[in-house]
Each structure stands twice: as C-alpha cells, then as structure tokens.
Image: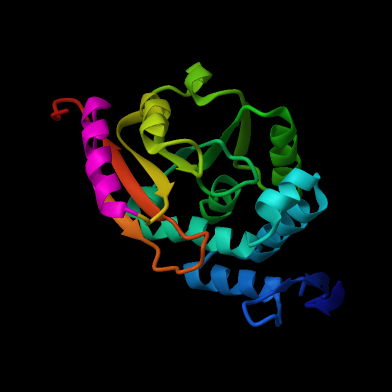
Amino acid sequence: MKRRRMAGAEKVRRRDRPDAAGAPVDVRAEIEALVARHGLEAGAADALDTLVRELKSDAEYLQKKWGTGATNRMADSLAALELEEVRSARRMADIGSGGGFPGLVLAVGLPDAHVALLEERGQRCDFLERTAKAMGLDNVEVVRGRAESWEAGQGTRDLVTCRGVSGAHVVLDWAVPLLAPGGAAVIWQSPRNAERYAEEMTRVAEANSVHLASIHSTGATNRFAKHHYVYVKNGDGDGA
C-alpha cells in the first residue's frame, strides 16, 4: 500500500488489482474519474474510497463477493444517475443492500435524499451501519429485515432500487408496496437475453400496477455491467 500526502490530508493510493494486461490499477484514480464524470460533490471520492477500504478489510465473504471489481460496481451503480427518476429522488429504498451496491454509492451521489438500506442479514447490516458512518453519510438509515416486512416504508418511496437480488418478478413484489404513486423501481439486470426478459417483465409489471417505462444501458462492457429496468407505479386513475 502506497501513501501520498495531498492537499494537507493523507490519501491512500491503492494499486492492488491488476487490469486485463496484468498491470496494476490505481483504484483512487478510478474513483476520482467516476466522481468527475458524474459531477459529484466535494468529498465524494473520499467517501467512495472508504467504501472500498471497508470492503477489503471486512469479513472474508465480503472481500470475496464485493471487494474485487469494486470500482466497476461503483460505475454500474452511479450510471443510474443518468436517469431522471434517480436524480430527482428524495426518499429512496435499496432492497438487499449487501456490500453497498448500489445503495451506499447512490447515497453519496444523492446527498439530499433519505436512503433506506434494506438488509435482512445481521452481519451485513452491521457492515452497512459501520461503513455509512465511516463514509460520513448522514442521509442513510439501515433497516434490518425483509422489504415486505417494512410496514413504515410502505407507500413512502419515490425510488426503490435493487441490484443482484433474486428474480426481477420477485423484486417487483417487494418494491411496489414501498412506492408512492408515480414512484419508480429501478432494477439492475444482466443485459443477456434483454429482449426476452423485457417481454416477460412487461407482463409481470401489469399484474403489479406498474409499467415498464424504459430500459437503460450503461454502455459498460465489463462483467459487472447491468441494464437498468425502470418501472413506474401507476398513479390514481392510471391504467394497470
């Protein structure tokens, strides 16, 4: 680990992950590039850098599941800021937050939003609470338990996100009760078989009083990249 002092503060420059050619990658530089690309506020790079550090220092299952390729997952998470439904959110819930993707990352990108991280596994809840504090996030609440059991959140969210948790048809069953009318559920899904998946999910959406508003491709080509499927809950008077 190589340390450099920048602007009066100690910054950690990590080159602990090789690229495809075997050359070391500067994780901090990748984070700073993401922050610049999305126009995030001052301090965002430090917060995201802290997330990587916490992932790599935590229990083995967190290191294995989320520590490798963390900046690729950050890029995939922050790409959702290209969606108006995400940028305008003020009350967000992330289902199955796990290692913080996309929940903790979007909490950095949406400092004015209240972000509820829904997680049923106690060890991961502990990680999320500890890491949110270390990242300096005061807009995050960790909700311990299953999404369908969170009665206080029902009908209150203008955005519900979910990445890499179960099938999207199940996620809609969890997400829709949390949405206010007109709210949006954004589901990260592999781009493989995207057309067939969209057709299937359009049918599922109709049964859940939502409609598939758009499919957003991040344009990324790494193996962590997903498509964003945006479902909007029908408002009063809208058709199913």
Tell which of 58 and 233 is nearer to you.
58
The residue that appears at 55% across and 69% down in the rendered structure is: 34
Name the main secondary structure of what is drawn in magenta: helix
Q: Is residue 115 above or below residue 79?
A: above
Whether the magenta-drawn stretch holds residue 189 is answered as no
Residue at 66% from the left image edge and 59% from the top image edge? 48
Residue 136 can be seen, yes or no: no
> In this orientation, does residue 186 appear?
yes
Vertical side of 217 occupied by 55: above or below:
above
Where is residue 52? Give x, y as percent.
Answer: 71, 58
Q: Quadrant of the C terminus?
A: top left
Residue 8 at what x, y percent from top left? Answer: 83, 75
Residue drawn at 38 percent across, 60 percent down: 82
Residue 71 point in image, percent of width and height? 61, 64
- Taking depth in this image into account, of 109 and 186 the one nearest to the observer is 186
Q: Which residues are magenta?
A: 193-213
Which quadrant would residue 12 be assigned to in this image? bottom right
Q: Is residue 176 left or right of residue 53?
A: left
Please report the residue visible at 51 percent of the width from the left and 51 percent of the height from the top.
110
Q: How is the image coloured?
A: rainbow
Determine the image quadrant of residue 51: bottom right
Q: Is residue 206 magenta?
A: yes
Which of the image's four quarters has the N terminus?
Answer: bottom right
Q: How many marks?
A: 0
Image x and y of residue 99, in percent:
65, 45
